[in-house]
Every structure is written in structure tokens, then in C-alpha cells.
Image: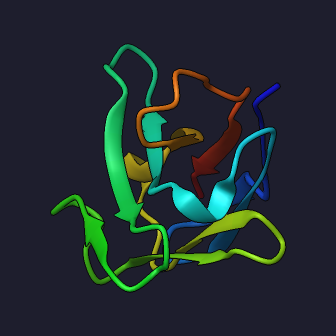
């Protein structure tokens, strides 16, 4: 069965960095586009970044462009989200998801606060 296990979240000060990881199993990871989403308290889940199956093309929400970088390792079946210059408004639970795969992991909490 599909499994997505997000990790790497935590508490960080504004301006700090975190690297999120998402380990995937149960499907042919290298064949799927992957996405990172986030959901802040009281808000809808929003798309943060996406990457094509081979990793050649990446897309970002305007709010995270330049600061966040999505990447993937198709040998390790893992997708990453490098987050730099974090802001309090980046506070949310972050989730990865395979495009057109109807499954959500438990997510990882990111809190940006001084």
C-alpha cells in the first residue's frame, strides 16, 4: 500500500532553515510527479512546490519562490523540501503527495517563531 512518511520539521527562528524529507513506498515513485503542500491552523491546505518525475522541472507558489527548493532522489524514493529564510507565515504542517495518488501522510510540523 502507498506510504508517505514526512520528517524534518521542527521549531526554527525567523531567517532559519529546515530540510524536509518524504520517504515514499507502495508505488513506482520514479514515475510520479511529487508535490509538497502545507496547511496552517484555520487555513486550507495549499500547494507549495512540485517536481516532475525525473526532477527536471520544478514549480513553486509565489510565497515561497527563491526561498524553498524541491528536489528528489529516485534511488532512495525520497522527495525533499529545502526551506531557507523561513518566516512566521511559513508555520504549518507540511505534507508530500504523489500527483494523482489519493493518499496523504501524517505530515511534519514546521513552526517559525522567535
Q: Residue at x 55, y 60 (%)?
A: 31
Q: Quadrant of residue 74?
A: bottom right
99 above or below 77?
above
Q: Quadrant of the N terminus?
A: top right
Q: Quadrant of the C terminus?
A: bottom right
Query: Horizontally, is 92 left or right of 100 in the view?
Result: right
Q: Residue at x 50, y 44 (%)?
A: 91
Q: Quadrant of residue 17?
A: bottom right
Q: Quadrant of residue 108?
A: top right
Q: How is the image coloured?
A: rainbow
Q: Residue at x 58, y 39 (%)?
A: 95
Q: Residue at x 63, y 47 (%)?
A: 110
Relative image position of residue 52 (x, y in whole percent): 40, 68
56 above or below 81?
below
Relative image position of residue 81 (x, y in whole percent): 57, 68
51 above or below 29?
below
* Outermost top residue: 42
Foreground residue, 94 or 52? 52
Amino acid at each position: 500500500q502507498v506510504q508517505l512518511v514526512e520528517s524534518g520539521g521542527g521549531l526554527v527562528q525567523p531567517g532559519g532553515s529546515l530540510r524536509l524529507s518524504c520517504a515514499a513506498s507502495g508505488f513506482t515513485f520514479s514515475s510520479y510527479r511529487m508535490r509538497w503542500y502545507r496547511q496552517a491552523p484555520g487555513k486550507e491546505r495549499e500547494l507549495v512546490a512540485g517536481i516532475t518525475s525525473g526532477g527536471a522541472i520544478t514549480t513553486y507558489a509565489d510565497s515561497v519562490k527563491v526561498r524553498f527548493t524541491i528536489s528528489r532522489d529516485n534511488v532512495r524514493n525520497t522527495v525533499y523540501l529545502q526551506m531557507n529564510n523561513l518566516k512566521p507565515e511559513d508555520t504549518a504542517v507540511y505534507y508530500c503527495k504523489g500527483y494523482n495518488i489519493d493518499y496523504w501522510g501524517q505530515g511534519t510540523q514546521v513552526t517559525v517563531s522567535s
